[in-house]
Image: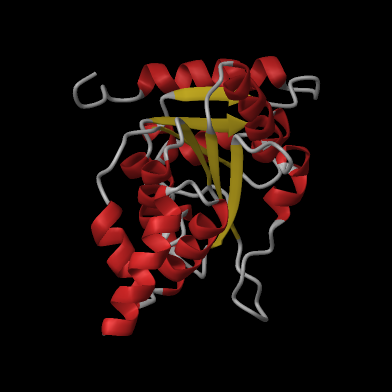
Amino acid sequence: MAVQESQAEELLHRFRQGDVRALARALTLVESGHPVGQELLKRLRGQARAKVVGITGSPGAGKSTLTDRLILEARKRGERVGVLAVDPSSPFTGGAILGDRIRMMRHHQDPGVYIRSLASRGALGGLAGATVAALALLEAFGFDRIFVETVGVGQSEVDIARVADTTLLVLTPAAGDAVQAFKAGVMEIADLFAVNKFDLPGGERIIQELKSALELSPPRPGG
């Protein structure tokens, strides 16, 4: 126990000094459920307050490309940006496949941007089990804005709304009657809707479907 407390203290000191390697190590410890990671969380939770944006949508809708552009806009405003990309788990290792990080590689030399992939490990709701803990660490590290990109979309994937201040749903014309499929769950928790790949046939139709679905939706609590 004394060794773990010593490790936590040393890592905490580096973390508070802004050491990115300490952040990466802390995230790994938290994701794996290590006692040192849990001790760090206890000491850091509740510090600072970033603006958290959840980005969800069907696989192939262009969530990562859109996130990439949002990172650029946030950096233009001088904001420090953290990104949590929840990837499908590898069936062999259980680790994240890292597809989202590959698509955002142009930011890897920017010290104001930190991108981390988390493996979903079969977690329901589109978020990795460690996402909330990872968010707490990124907030404590001092990021101004954090983007959380989910695995894909389904009616069970509404827990993004629990961790995000703003939830963005990405739709595409190629999804056909995607709006109908989303109405039972994700449609009701989204704050913003983005129709991506609008140059594809059916762009105007999906916007009309979206408007119709929103008109038929019950009022949101507090709305």
* Whole-percent x, y for residue 34 in the image: 39, 76
At a point 67% along the width and 81% down the height, the residue shown is 92
Residue 142 is at least partly visible in this image: yes
At a point 37% along the width and 21% down the height, the residue shown is 216
Quick check: 45 left or right of 125? left
At a point 52% along the width and 32% down the height, the residue shown is 169
Residue 86 is at least partly visible in this image: no
* Whole-percent x, y for residue 112 in the image: 60, 34
At a point 53% along the width and 31% down the height, the residue shown is 80
* Whole-percent x, y for residue 146 in the image: 48, 37
Quick check: 172 left or right of 9? right
Residue nearer the viewer, 78 or 166:
78
Residue furthest left as drawn: 222
* Whole-percent x, y for residue 165 in the image: 36, 31
Residue nearer the viewer, 203 or 109:
109
Pick the quarter of the image with the N terminus: bottom left
Q: Is residue 221 above or below residue 37?
A: above
Q: Could you say which quadrant of the image residue 129 lies in?
A: bottom left
Pick the quarter of the image with the C terminus: top left
Q: Is residue 34 above or below residue 86?
A: below
